[in-house]
């Protein structure tokens, strides 16, 4: 149990700046998800926290203590990786015991056996205990990896895309299990992923990372509903937020593409600027009486909903509609949007104008 | 894959087997020759055509390990008769033929030379492989300034044919008193093998994912413990292969052994040809020496065969 803090942490690999003055605070018992593309610096953040990399600048604090001179072992964090995470020559039991046999813990045999037994029961891997890890399926391996982390009762859990090598169904199952585990343990989790669905569904808080900088931190709904800039708007949510270029004329949005207009809530600071109008696919309304005409370009049927891609001039917009709606390719439809849900971004800076 | 085979496949399959058998035959003939000669009576060793069927003897081995010389004091018949059979055998080579009381038989140098070979080859292999593994680990896992240049430098030590420096080495060794010492040859062979060992082990260690050690570090082990507990078991295959190569090189080395040693630390390779002598060579003795000389490499390779064959399988990794 601990809180974590990064203060102005920078990390360079040669000329490559992996982290640029990163500030991050994770409260005790929080499930914090760090979301970002490949190369955004997520893994580096984890490694700096774990002590596997030394930051070029800045401080790492665990429970308010600067851990710069602490070894990896002393930091007492557990790390779960996407792959290569189990010791290949050991059995499942051997893997679970491995961290407990470290001298720094000084546990006796009975305690070790007891802890392994308990963890195996929690993760339902008791039957696998004497199996060699090479005989395990991907899901079982990840379960054992998580087990090896839990068995230590560490101060912090660091997870580096632990589910992304698994198939979709297993991923969902383990996602639920991890979440439950977090609730039961009440421990601090830092979970790194590029999968925004994982981020949204698991995190108490999400931090969006881009090119080594933390762009936005907030609860999933904050990040989803009030992205601070176009980058966050694009990277959170599937399908992503529609961003349409245009300008503001009083309380109507005038689009560059073919000049169609839609109403928005007036915003003083936005007048006269080149803007992006951001609207989530579920806030586009497709109905016969709507103001703008568009052509259906693509239909994805997801069962519960349909995701339409509609074409207006040069813009391709996503809209989610009910699965019952009858629509066919190349059909002309009319759409509008929920004016109160539209976000305004400055084209030049990408900033959300409502947020500033 | 036990599907239906076409005739073509069957043909090529059989042709391949035939090819392998021919190659195997060609490779095994010298070994057969040496082995059979090692057990032949002297008069059958050089017959043309070669004798294939004969009653095997161990007299070549007895002669190999013994040395005859003349002594002034006659060996008493009682002493001979009282001696156990193996000592009697040493006296007459197992043949109860003409026995001269003037001849005395003593141990030859072969046993000692063989032991020297074992000590020197095993120690230098151990040193070269362990130092090579540690060096390779360092190069593989840490940022070393000018890493490529260092690696090239290490490789470059092998570019010169070693014999070229034999004379200066000889002079230096004599100066520092390493001439004709076990340590001298061990240092020499370790130095030969080290660059090879570093390069080979670096390749093997590069293949082992860092994640294993990092997991061990996070799990509360020091880097040294992580190296021994996690990296070393994974590197066993590479270590076995490297050790076999180093051992063979050190075991077979002839030129330096001949130059750098003369008695105390001489290894088996220079000893065997020294037995040819000036007169009519006894090929059976030479064959016996060679036959025994082949055994350690065969045994060593046999012991490590599982590691050699195992290949690079990293168990739990999903690539």
Image (cartoon, grey):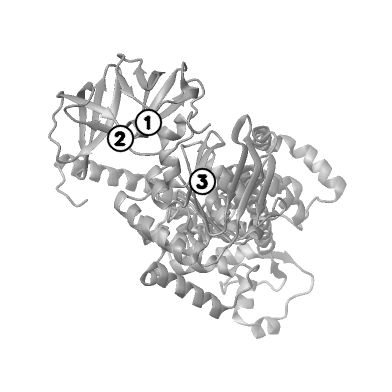
* Circles 3 and 2 on the same subunit: no
Task: Check contact, mark 2 vs mark 1: CB within 8 A.
Answer: yes
Q: Residues within 10 Å of mark 3 (few under 14, many from 20)?
A: some
Identify the subunit bearing mark 3: B
Image disc number at residue A342: 1
Identify the subunit bearing mark 1: A
Please give the residue where the numbered disc 2 appears in the rendered image.
Answer: A283
Task: Check contact, mark 3 vs mark 1: CB within 8 A.
Answer: no
Residue at image point 30% right, 35% down: A283
Query: Helix, strand or loop at disc 3?
Result: helix
Q: Residues within 10 Å of mark 1 (few under 14, many from 20)?
A: many
Q: Is residue B193 shown to the viewer in this render?
A: no
- Give the mark nearer the N terminus: 2 vs 1: 2
Specify whether B163 is left or right of B23.
right
Residue at image point 59% right, 49% down: A25
Residue A73 position in % (x across, y down): 64, 59
* Circles 2 and 1 on the same subunit: yes
The N terminus of chain A lies in quadrant: bottom right
Image disc number at residue B207: 3
Please identify the quarter of the rendering in which residue A143 is found: bottom left
Please identify the quarter of the rendering in which residue A337 is found: top left
Residue B138 position in % (x across, y down): 65, 46
């Amino acid at each position: 149990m601990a809180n974590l803090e990064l203060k102005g942490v920078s990390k360079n690999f040669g000329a490559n700046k992996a982290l640029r003055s990163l500030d991050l605070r994770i409260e005790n018992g929080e499930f914090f998800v760090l979301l970002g593309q490949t190369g955004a610096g997520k893994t580096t953040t984890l490694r700096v926290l774990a002590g596997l990399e030394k930051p070029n600048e800045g401080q790492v604090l665990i429970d308010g203590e600067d851990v710069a001179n602490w070894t990896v072992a002393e930091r007492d964090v557990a790390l779960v990786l996407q792959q290569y995470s189990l010791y290949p020559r050991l059995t499942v039991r051997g893997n679970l015991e491995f961290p407990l046999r470290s001298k720094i813990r000084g546990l006796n045999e009975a305690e070790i056996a007891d802890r392994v037994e308990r963890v195996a029961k929690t993760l339902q891997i008791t039957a696998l205990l004497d199996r060699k890890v090479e005989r395990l399926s991907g899901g079982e391996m990840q379960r054992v990896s998580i087990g090896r982390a839990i068995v230590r009762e560490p101060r912090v859990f660091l997870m580096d895309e632990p589910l992304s090598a698994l198939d979709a169904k297993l991923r969902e199952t383990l996602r639920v299990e991890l979440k439950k585990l977090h609730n039961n343990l009440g421990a601090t989790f830092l979970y790194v992923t590029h999968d925004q669905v994982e981020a949204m569904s698991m995190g108490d808080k999400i931090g969006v990372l881009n090119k080594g900088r933390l762009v936005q931190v907030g609860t999933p709904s904050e990040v989803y509903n009030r992205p601070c800039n176009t980058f966050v708007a694009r990277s959170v949510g599937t399908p992503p937020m529609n961003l349409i270029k245009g300008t503001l004329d009083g309380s109507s949005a005038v689009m560059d593409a073919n000049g169609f207009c839609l109403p928005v809530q007036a915003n003083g600071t936005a007048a006269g600027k080149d803007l992006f109008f951001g609207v989530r696919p579920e806030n586009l309304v497709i109905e016969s009486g709507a103001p703008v005409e568009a052509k259906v370009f693509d239909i994805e049927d997801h069962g519960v909903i349909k995701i339409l891609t509609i074409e207006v001039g040069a813009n391709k917009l996503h809209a989610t509609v009910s699965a019952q709606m009858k629509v066919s390719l190349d059909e002309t439809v009319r759409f509008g949007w929920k004016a109160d849900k539209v976000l305004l971004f400055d084209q030049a800076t990408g900033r959300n104008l409502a947020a500033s | 894959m036990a599907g239906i085979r076409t005739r073509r496949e069957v043909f090529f399959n059989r042709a391949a087997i035939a090819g392998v058998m021919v190659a195997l035959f060609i490779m095994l003939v010298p070994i057969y020759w040496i082995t059979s000669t090692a057990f032949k009576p002297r008069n059958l060793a050089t017959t043309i055509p070669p004798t294939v069927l004969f009653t095997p003897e161990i007299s070549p081995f007895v002669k190999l390990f013994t040395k005859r010389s003349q002594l002034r004091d006659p060996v008493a018949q009682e002493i001979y008769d009282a001696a156990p059979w193996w000592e009697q055998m040493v006296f007459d080579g197992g043949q109860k033929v003409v026995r001269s009381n003037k001849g005395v038989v003593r141990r030859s140098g072969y046993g000692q030379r063989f032991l020297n070979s074992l000590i020197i080859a095993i120690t230098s292999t151990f040193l070269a492989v362990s130092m090579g593994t540690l060096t390779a680990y360092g190069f593989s896992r840490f940022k070393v300034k000018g890493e490529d240049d260092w690696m090239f430098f290490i490789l470059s030590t092998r570019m010169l044919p070693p014999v070229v420096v034999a004379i200066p080495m000889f002079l230096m060794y004599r100066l520092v008193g390493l001439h004709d010492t076990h340590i001298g040859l061990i240092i020499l062979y370790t130095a030969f093998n080290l660059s090879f060992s570093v390069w080979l082990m670096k390749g093997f260690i590069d293949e082992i994912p860092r994640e294993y050690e990092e997991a061990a570090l996070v799990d509360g082990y020091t880097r040294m413990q992580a190296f021994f507990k996690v990296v070393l078991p994974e590197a066993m295959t590479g270590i076995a292969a490297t050790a076999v190569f180093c051992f063979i090189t050190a075991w077979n080395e002839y030129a330096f052994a001949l130059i750098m040693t003369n008695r105390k630390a001489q290894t088996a390779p220079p000893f065997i040809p020294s037995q040819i002598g000036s007169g009519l060579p006894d090929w059976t003795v030479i064959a016996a020496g060679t036959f025994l000389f082949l055994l350690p490499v065969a045994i060593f390779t046999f012991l490590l065969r599982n590691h050699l064959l195992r290949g690079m399988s990293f168990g739990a990794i999903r690539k």
